[in-house]
Amino acid sequence: MPTPIPPIPPASPILRTRAYAMLAIVMLLWAGNAIVGRAVHDAVPPFALAFGRWLGALAVLSPIAVRRTLRERAEVARGWVPLLLLGLLGVAAFNAFLYSGLRFTTASNGLLMQATIPPLVMLLGRLLFGDRAVAGQVVGVAFSTLGVVIIVFKGDFGALAGLRVGKGDVLVLCGCAAWACYTACLRLRPQVSPETFLFVTFAIGVLAMAPLALIEAAHGARVAWGTGAVAAFCYVAVLPSVVAYFLYNAAVGAIGAGAAGQTISLMPLFGAALAAPLLHEELHAYHGFAMVLILSGVVLAARATAPGRRSG
């Protein structure tokens, strides 16, 4: 496996602000992805949705990426091991687990479970690459995690005694572990253009999902085609795939894996904001308190990973 890409110089305040703005857009798009996945779980089987997502994303990306990928084929060949690893983790495994889990749990639960990603990114960064998280970053993750816990238990910590983890939650958690590995290991990507990197990893996702989708279909799972299914495929193929992955990978390169991973705590906020009008879910006072904690955690982590102190 090639050595990690050398750390880039610390980003300026303007570049850091732009990176966080990009991450906010990413989290909004990914919150929508979870809601769409749950909304069509009866009409679109999970592996069919994942396969259609990456096939569509690959088609959208091809006009701007094929020629560049061919020009960079030597770098792709040299870096095939990390490309395969990142494609399997961040494109294939994460989405296969997420969409499968959303068949058995709610969109809200799916979003909330993803709050486990920031501490997992820090842990993996430490174990795999020797990253050292500064105190402010740890406190920020703790604040955000506490905010998510408050939402999970609706402000009633006595509900912890009755906690039951279902099949869907376990599947989503497996997806979270895959995404945390992807984020921590993005530093291993070969020195190819963003277009080439996404094209190759999306192609890996298509190849990995194709046999699973075929097995799923062989067992009788079929797409119930209609306006909702078509709209779902269009959304997941373009916005949370091509657009969001470009933005996320660029932001990780600018501010590091730890700081970028922390912003995933924003997804429950955006999920609640989307679920209220789209799924007619009510917002309560504890949501507001939890949102303050989550936002405070993100801000603390951002300040702690300022230039010269970032960990990824």
Image: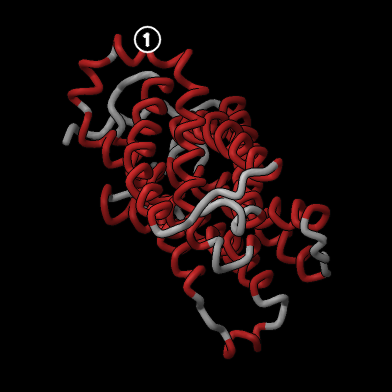
Q: Quadrant of residue 174?
A: bottom left
Please say which color scheme the image uses. Answer: secondary structure
Residue tagged by mark 1? Answer: 67
Residue positioned 51% across, 38% down in the render:
53
Observer-nearest residue: 294 or 271?
A: 271
Residue 83 percent across, percent down from the top left = 28, 34
Q: Amino acid at mark 1?
A: Arg
Q: Is residue 223 left or right of residue 1?
A: right
Q: Quadrant of residue 189?
A: top left
Residue positioned 46% across, 36% down in the render:
54
Secondary structure state at the residue bearing disc 1: helix
Q: How many marks?
A: 1
| Location of the N terminus (image quadrant) | top left
Residue positioned 56% across, 84% down in the render:
163
Observer-nearest residue: 141 or 43?
A: 43
Residue 302 percent across, percent down from the top left = 57, 45
Observer-nearest residue: 198 or 57?
A: 57
> Can residue 148 be seen at all in this image of the molecule?
yes
Q: Is residue 233 left or right of residue 52?
A: right
Q: Is residue 77 left or right of residue 103?
A: left
Residue 23 percent across, percent down from the top left = 59, 38
Q: Quadrant of residue 234?
A: top right
> Can residue 133 be seen at all in this image of the molecule?
no
Above or below for 77 versus 219 = above
Residue 70 percent across, percent down from the top left = 30, 12
| Location of the C terminus (image quadrant) | top left
Residue positioned 38% across, 14% down in the render:
66
Above or below for 207 versus 171 = above
Other residues around mark 1 within 10 Å, as few (<14) / some (14–19) / many (≥20): few
